[in-house]
Amino acid sequence: MKLIRKQSKSSTDSAAHESAFDRRTFLKRSGLTASGAAVAASIPLGMMRRRAEAQTDSAPAQRNVEVKRTVCSHCSVGCGSIAHVENGVWVNQEPDFDSPLNLGAHCAKGASLRYHGMSEKRVRYPMKLVDGEWKRLSWEQAVNEIGDQFLKIREESGPDSVWWCGSSKASNEGSYLQRKFAAFWGTNNIDHQARICHSTTVAGVANTWGYGAMTNSYNDMHNCKSMLFIGSNAAEAHPVAMQHILRGKENGAKMIVVDPRFTRTAAHADQHVRLRPGSDVAFIWGLLWHIFENGWEDAEYIRQRVYGLEKIRQEVANWDPATCEEVTGVPEAEMRQVAQTLAENRPGTIVWCMGGTQHHIGNNNTRAYCVLQLALGNIGVSGGGANIFRGHDNVQGATDVGPNSHTLPGYYGLADGAWKHWARVWDVDYEWLKARFDNEREYDAGDGTMAPTMNIPGIPVSRWIDGILEDPENLSQRDNIRAVFFQGHAVNSQTRGPEMKKAIEKLDMVVISDPYPTHLAVMSERKNGVYLLPTCTQFEQAGSATASNRSLQWREKVIDPLFESKPDAAILYLMASKFGFADEMFKHIAVDDGGMPSSEDTLREINRGHWTIGYTGQSPERLKLHAEHRRTFDTTSLVAKGGPCDGETYGLPWPCWGNPEMGHPGTHVLYDTSKPVSEGGLTFRARFGTEHEGNNILAEGSYSKNSDIEDGYPEFSYGMLRRLGWHQELSADELATIAWVGGLREKPNGTVTEQDVSEFRTMESDALDAVNWKTDLSGGIQRVAIAHECAPFGNAKARAIVWTFPDEVPLHREPLYTARYDLVSKYPTYDDRKAFWRLPTLYASIQDTDYSGDYPLVFTSGRLVEYEGGGEETRSMKWLAELQQEMFVEINPADANDRGIRDNQWVWLEGPEGGRIKIRSMLTERVGRGVVWTPFHFGGWFQGKDLIDRYPEGSAPYIRGEACNTATTYGYDSVTQMQETKSTLCQIKAA
Amino acid sequence: MARMKFLCDADRCIECNGCVTACKNANEVPWGVNRRRVVTLNDGLPGEKSISVACMHCTDAPCAAVCPVDIFYTTTDGIVLHDKDLCIGCGYCFYACPFGAPQFPKTEAFGMRGKMDKCTFCAGGPPEDGSEEEFEKYGANRIAAGKLPACAEMCATKALLAGDGDMVADIYRQRVMRRAGRPQTWGWGKAYGEA
């Protein structure tokens, strides 16, 4: 046996000796000697680095390699990554050990990031489909042709006849401009993936306690004593989150996974509970039944901070163990074990994802999860919380600031006041903005009133095909959708494939702005009128992205745009120029010679307008400082210890109140009263008034640390400051701006003196009083509230009941397509609705038919670790594509044997609406009897046919397969229009 | 002097394949050649365990023992490397290896990747460290650059550890202590009964 190099070279030998591990320096570098073994064991392990980092970096330096810091674009964990770029080529990828979010770690997708810089499958130049052939265009030709046709459609059918789709894959700046662009075009017909991802979470959770976002963070899960995953498969969907989850588990947390499948996450759990798809509300009420029965609820917390729990108790009383088992399939002993684990191991967190959200009662599910956590007193505490894992890398940011059809950026809504707020931020005339919309007549807003289109939510991404197919008489807009513009979206993630195909074929034209051609380009039989615009990935531009925990991270540009690609924002600038509103839209955003709007300026504009959610403190300068000094942040608390960011939380998780100059540190754990607001503490938001049916709904005896008001209080307005006498603390500048917002003076220009505003100091004016923490563009109201350690948004109770929703108390309702038709009479769906998000929406008329005879298998879907979303991008990356080469369906061996199906054979899976997909069988007990599961990342096939010939030459992804949603069915959430993909029906036959 | 070892903590491995693509990325390994792969036992059943496997850089490597043309050598760091210029692609090492580590390109058997291909612990091969020739034939030499294998450095959950065997053992021992009586690495239950 040889222990020395066979062909020894002196240089390599000495290198080997020099770089050999030195135990002492290793321990020092990794911090293991710092404070003994107890700490050592909690330090993330496996990060064994060579002693001299300088040595690591010196190698690139000699070769003139640039080092860029970016963030993975494949899920919401926000993993940092280091790119080495040589002569413009991304030559090497290194782990970002200093990132407190991932500590260098990556899953299969993150470890493949460099492939984005070398994919051969990209759309290389603008193209259009002419008689079935893809023809190359110049950018100028493309923009002119598309623009002229859009303007013609606008002329004939109104601005609502073009439907825009933005993206969770865009940066905050890109997605913000997508929404702003639609507003300037004059429509609310713009939406993005969040609709079909966590819209029911945002609506349900925000209506419970204020904000519809993850309350804590991945890192905070180190502090959990128990963790309940329901409808979340973190091991495949958020793999790097598992680093934190398993650390929590190693710290002693009990881990429970509730899922119809025995997932890879369940394989690491202490307990796996198999529930029937679509029975989440019943499951949670079944848990609460045990909790209430045993008095395990947190009575004092509920008294101080929760409203409406009595009505929940009445409903929970219906869910005794036998009823619960009948509906969920979970036996009493298992239910009790879960309830007891949660009760005895507090604080505990709940994690949910699309397994919970994608139901027509998704908003009921999310509210039930919240109620469980409130009953246990788990919200607003480190180690507790509702850790809602978002999907795409910037789906949180795009939801917050980007393209949503029901609201302007920052959840301001669509009421006139919201438009006026944004007109002030954008520095445009409100009347001009209004004139951009279809003002011919008013339409059914769906709530019993008639309204102009400007105030009616646009058609959501789950329903765009109905905007094309529905009789225009039934629409709350002038005409059908006649053209679509998709920027960064996969249509194979939406249901009802055959109808989608019909809809695409009916359109005047289709524009796809994407790095890859996408399923949309090939799934229809169109021969003309499809345009492809080559669009950059996030590695070809700079900008910020918001991770699931609400932290913003700045991405440096890694490489120049590939081929003729342009970033989202640059394409929007071209289109805006064509339409003639670029000067208005980019009034305060510099555009460089290459036509790229400044990401920094765009973020500053975001900062100027997003007071509701505290996106105001995260200036580009602060984010870049955090990126530079990321190693100074604690990996559990995310707080910087020393250094220039001392005391701030990594990425300034929103709300980061006030102006950047105010220096708010960001909010790591939402609603945590143990800290002062100025240090990231919070109360529950007073969003729903101060009274309900004569009951006080403000907090009672609970307030954030050091608060000058030691009880509940409503949200802050100028009027409230005045009544408290705190308005005198506003500066002259702040008061001048407030007076301007209140319509009492001109916009402040230049220096404001005390004399200019002295009249307002004593004025009692409704207009002035009405200016509040959300509309005050000076930030003064927030500053003064926080100076008194009060939350600008008030201090209320969380509400366990939402009286503005179809189900005040979350109720179990059977899925529209249910295998348990016998339960429909007891747990029926809703009545059909005539105008809901501009469209007729069916419930009862679908559930009226029993499909469970011909389609007896419950069909649900989910993720594979190797791919993301619709998969167009990841299936075009060799390193990933090699690992999952075929679309398949998991079927229980018993169900397979009943159908004469062997493992790995071709089968037809057919949904009750007739969509059929030809895929491989995978026999596994991962799924229970009666349930089948498919991944949702495949595309490029349609009903048995590989569509490779329809892609522009050489651009078809390495791996193509049937989109599972070709076979999924109708069904939309009663509040948000979320699609019901996690519980429908199918039949499977050998092919 | 170090003796380099891998250790995959099966209680942390989630089969995310990050190690697999990290390896592809760092070494530009072609489609069809898998220097590292994740093996899952009891897939989809209670007791499911995954473990990431590559060349284990054995001290008394069976591949080296059987190789008819004697291409294997062990570096001073205890990394088992091989010389593709001498390899005849017979596959005898494949017989001998207990881990299925040796890979044989499906196409271009005598192409740029030479013949047998396997994990190098990101330590390249006989040509000069960091040279183009070394990268072409063997992939990255991160060890010479003062780094550890990409697979372990990028592991999503820090399940896969790589480095000096003593330090890997220390880290793993501390982690096991931390787990406070929970089941430990794969095989523990079988060897010592369920905890």
Image (cartoon, grey):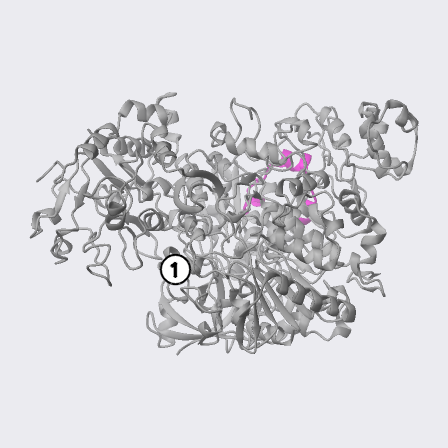
On the image, the x and y values in percent for residue A380 come to 60, 35
Q: Is residue A691 visible?
A: yes
x then y, percent, for residue A304: 68, 34
Secondary structure beneath label 1 = helix
The residue shown at (77%, 52%) is A414
Q: Is residue A218 above or below residue A454?
A: above
Q: Residue at x 33, y 32 (%)?
A: A49
Q: Measuring 54% from the left and 62% from the top, which residue is drawn there?
A: A490
Between A590 and A76, the residue placed more toward the observer is A590
Determine the residue positioned at 24% across, 43% down.
Answer: B124
The majority secondary structure of the magenta stretch comes to helix
Q: Indicate the position of residue A632 as horizontal and vertical percent values.
A: 49, 27
Q: Quadrant of the C terminus of chain B?
A: top left
Q: Position of residue A891 (x, y in %)?
A: 40, 67
Which one is nearer the viewer's eye here, A258 or A592? Answer: A592
Quadrant of the frame with the N terminus of chain B: top left
Mark 1: few/some/many CA within 10 Å (<14, 14-19, 20+): many
Amino acid at dot 1: Ala
Q: Is residue A48 left or right of residue A659?
A: left
Q: Quadrant of residue A434?
A: bottom right
Q: Residue under label 1, please give it.
A: A881
* Image-quadrant location for residue A138: bottom right
Magenta residue check for A458 = no
- Residue toward you, B185 or A332: B185
- The chain under label 1 reads A
Magenta stretch encompasses residue A299? yes
- The answer to whether residue A827 is visible is no
* Residue A384 figure quarter: top right
Q: Which residues are magenta?
A: A290-312
